[in-house]
Amino acid sequence: MSRVLEVIDAASEWTGRISAFLIPGMMLIMTYEVVARYILKRPTTWAMESTQYLFLATTALGGAYVLLHGGHVNVPILYARLSTRTQAIVDVVTSLFFFFFMIALFRVSWMTTVESVVHLEHSPTYWGPPIYPVYIVMTAGILLTILQGLAKLVRDFATAITGKVERSQRIARTPQDELR
């Protein structure tokens, strides 16, 4: 089981780090668009749509990475005062909301992706690039986030039962956790 969790963690880490390289690409495209539009007076038809697709890929592929490193927004007013075991129990219970939302999101994304791939859908804009690769990336990112959520759930169950935090789970803890 720990090998499966390590593979999920590695996939999340790898896709998160790779997707981070899309951000400079977005910056370069938008810089080019600003120069082309305001200095050269020749705006592009592709820059805005390209950056939107890159942003979607960054967000979709970065979700599992953020979950792996405990970077999603939370409100630790009460949570931080709880013991490690109680935090794990709370995480197990609240994971039901996570999985309900993510599975519903995956279902809709999967249906949209299949439809888009079958029809080799293109964007309805003037530029009209193929849009099905964007849907594929989005669906893959959602699936990877679900898998990372399952890995977190397994670890939270173990912590809830034993009261001990697994070594690989420590990377997801916040600096405030280390103060306790």
Image: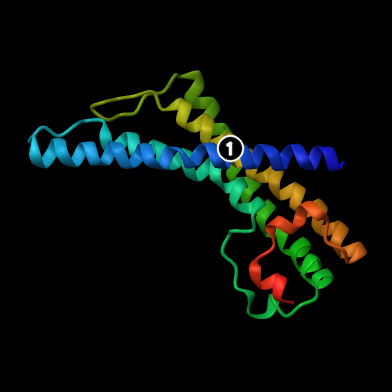
User: Which residue is at 64% across, 58% downward?
Assistant: 70
For disc 1, the neighbor class at 10 Å (few under 14, some 14 to 19, many from 20) is some
Which one is nearer the viewer's eye here, 167 or 48? 167
Residue 112 visible from this viewpoint: no
User: Which residue is at 64% across, 45% downward?
Assistant: 145
The figure's colour scheme reads rainbow
Q: Quadrant of residue 13?
A: top right
Left or right side of 147 for 29: left
Q: Quadrant of the N terminus?
A: top right
Q: Look at mark 1 in the image and give the residue it sits on.
A: 15
Left or right side of 70 for 151: right
Q: Quadrant of residue 125?
A: top left
Q: Quadrant of the C terminus?
A: bottom right
User: Which residue is at 82% across, 51% downward?
Assistant: 154
Q: Quadrant of residue 167?
A: bottom right
Image: 38 above or below 167:
above
Residue 69 drawn at (x, y percent): 64, 54
Q: Which amino acid does the dot numbered 1 rest on?
A: Thr
Left or right side of 20 for 85: right
Residue 172 visible from this viewpoint: yes
Which one is nearer the viewer's eye here, 8 or 20? 20
